[in-house]
Amino acid sequence: MSEGSAAAAAAAESADRADRADRADSAPAIIRLDNGIRNYAWGSTTDIPRLLGLPVTGEPVAELWMGAHPDQPSRARDQRGGAGLDELIASDPIGLLGAPTRQRYGARLPYLLKLLAAGKCLSIQVHPNQEQARAGYDAEVGGGPAVDAGHRNYTDPHHKPELLCALTEFEALCGFRPVAATLDYLGALIGAGAGRLAGLRELLGGRDPLRAAFTELLELSGPSREVIVAETTAAARALVAEGGRWSGAARASVLAAGDFPGDIGVVLAVLLNYVRLNPGEAIFLRAGNVHAYLRGFGVEILANSDNVLRCGLTEKHIDVAELLKVTDFRALDEPLWPRTSLPSGQPAFVVPVPDFELVVLQDMAEFTPVAVAGPSLVVCTAGSLQVRAAGEIVSVAQGQSVFVPARNGPPQVRAQSAHGFLAAVGG
């Protein structure tokens, strides 16, 4: 490089640093967010509108997205005419994300926070791990279906682990039930009239039992599928009416049959853990975990991806071969995910992926530093809380959220007679 070129490059770099500094000086320390609503058909008609103080119209409102996902980024209420959070991050990734997050994830927020309200069953589904997502995405980009095609499996090259914390009683399916317990449950269903499930019991007594049983059900078609779904539905209804040990698990199939009559997901549910969460309890859905949300309202945090492979309770595309490649066929003994504490004392859900962690904000009478690194996003779910960063204090009312750039964190929070959550990058 010539002496003149080197001087020009140094001048350009200096000007860029000065421009970033000017933007940082003029930008608010805490960014108020306007968030996008997703009106999927399975959404509750009441939960999200009531929390946000909106009219209940009878239309389903499924999710409120908070973050920088390119499909529906939050918008900055007080900055640059409502710029998208993804745009702000792209314009100053070091300032908003911090150098460690920028280095690890590029110029993208690695997590997405949601309010999720299920008035009907979501599809039974699985998410890929990072290696599978990258390979699947690259293969489809290299000559596969268009990114918005209904039969496409991968919309981005990222994994999608997720955690859901219940705000109300929440029902879900989460991972495969241990085989011995499922054999007991099958016995109850068969005794209630589902004789076609006897073949499933035989498969569960063999080699690689969960893979064998799951594959068998996915590959059923025609009258064989119709009969086993009908028998399972009738037997599950009988067990619910009877009460007893298996009434909860049977309820999952009853709900599934009511929302998706004739769908094989009614029978797939028999293999899965049925979970009824109390408010404040959580489940973590790692890569390969077969799961479905059935009913309830919660806060969900996930890696910033939209990769979903469906296997039941859906009218959308099901790719059985790809699904079997990414599914984890190990039994999940305990589907509930424990709550721990940060070094600063706040209760939190810390998961074995670095993309995110979720901090519970409650019982904080004074401003308290929250021991997180990198960018953070705060949502209030009850009452009104306050966030302080870089000398600014912002009140966050129920249903509102704010983003605290890494350069201004970690934030301090006061949540007296209030409740909320703080999303952050994991350690």
Image: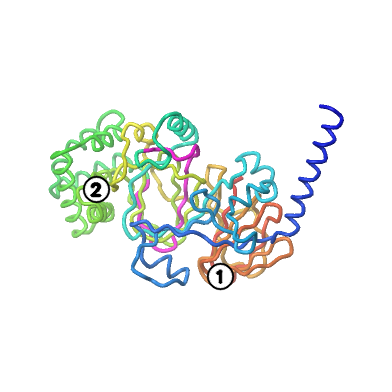
Can you say whether 283 is above or below 367 in the image?
Answer: above
Can you say whether 16 is above or below 358 in the image?
Answer: above
Residue 159 colored in magenta in the image: yes
Of 245 and 352, nearer the camera is: 352
Q: Which residue is mark 1?
A: 397
Does residue 262 show up? yes
Can you say whether 130 is above or below 60 in the image?
Answer: above
Query: Is mark 1 in CB contact (under 8 Å) with mark 2?
Result: no
Task: Looking at the image, tell me whether mark 1 or mark 2 is earlier in sequence order.
Answer: 2
Q: Amino acid at mark 2?
A: Val
Between the C-alphas of marks 1 and 2, the distance is 40 Å
Residue 371 colored in magenta in the image: no
Residue 201's spot in the image, x, y percent?
Answer: 21, 37
Label 1 SS: strand
Does residue 245 show up? no
Q: Which residue is mark 2?
A: 266
Residue 96's spot in the image, x, y percent?
Answer: 66, 51
In the shown orientation, is residue 62 left or right of residue 1?
left
Residue 403 picture quarter: bottom right
Label 2 SS: helix
